[in-house]
Image (cartoon, grey):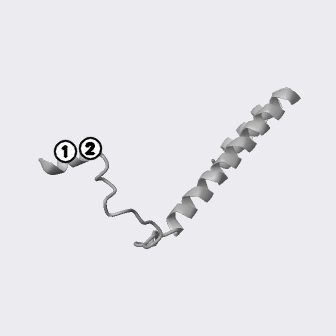
Amino acid sequence: MSVMELQNFENQLELLSFAEQLSVMEYLARLIKRNQKEQDYSSKAVTKKRQFGIAKGKFTYPQDFDEENEEIVKLLIL
């Protein structure tokens, strides 16, 4: 935003009532807060790297987990 645009915005803001000015300021505050959250989220997503095999050994399952399901047994036989 250029200096001229900012001055024009300030002039237009002064023409509003106090309640309208307050409403505009609250809206701008919400936009700034949302923008900061988005920047925080995007910076965390970029810096955090995934590590391959990080859950190795943490999950176990029985070797015959699909034998009790008749539908899977039928598929294996075909």
Residue 2 percent across, percent down from the top left = 64, 48
State the residue lying farthest toward the left.
78
* Apparent side of residue 1 relative to residue 50 in the rendered image (left or right): right
What is the secondary structure assignment of the residue under circle 2?
helix
Using the numbered discs, state the Cα–Cα distance from disc 2 to disc 1 in whole angstroms: 6 Å
Q: Please give the name of the residue rendered at 30% of the width and 53% of the height, measured from the top-left corner.
A: 66
Callout 1 secondary element: helix
Mark carried by residue 70: 2
Tell me the kind of residue under disc 2.
Answer: Glu
- Confirm or deny contact between disc 2 and disc 1 (CB under 8 A): yes
Task: Residue lying at the far right in this picture: please name it.
Answer: 18
Toward which corner of the image does residue 51 lie, by quadrant? bottom left
Give the number of the disc on residue 22: none
What percent of the width, then of the height, locates residue 64? 31, 59
From what the image shows, is residue 24 above or below residue 76? above
| Mark 1 surroundings within 10 Å by alpha-carbon count, few (fewer than 14), some (14 through 19), many (20 or more) | few
- The residue wearing badge 1 is 74
Residue 27: x %, y % from top left: 73, 37
Q: Is residue 72 left or right of residue 52?
A: left
Q: Residue at image x 18%, y 51%?
A: 76
Q: Position of residue 59 (x, y in %)?
A: 45, 66
Relative to residue 15, is residue 44 depicted above or below?
below
At 75% from the left edge and 44% from the top edge, which residue is drawn? 29
| Amino acid found under the numbered disc labelled 1 | Lys
Q: Is residue 62 left or right of residue 27?
A: left
Please tell me which residue lies in front, 8 or 43: 43
Q: Residues within 10 Å of mark 2 (few under 14, many from 20)?
A: few
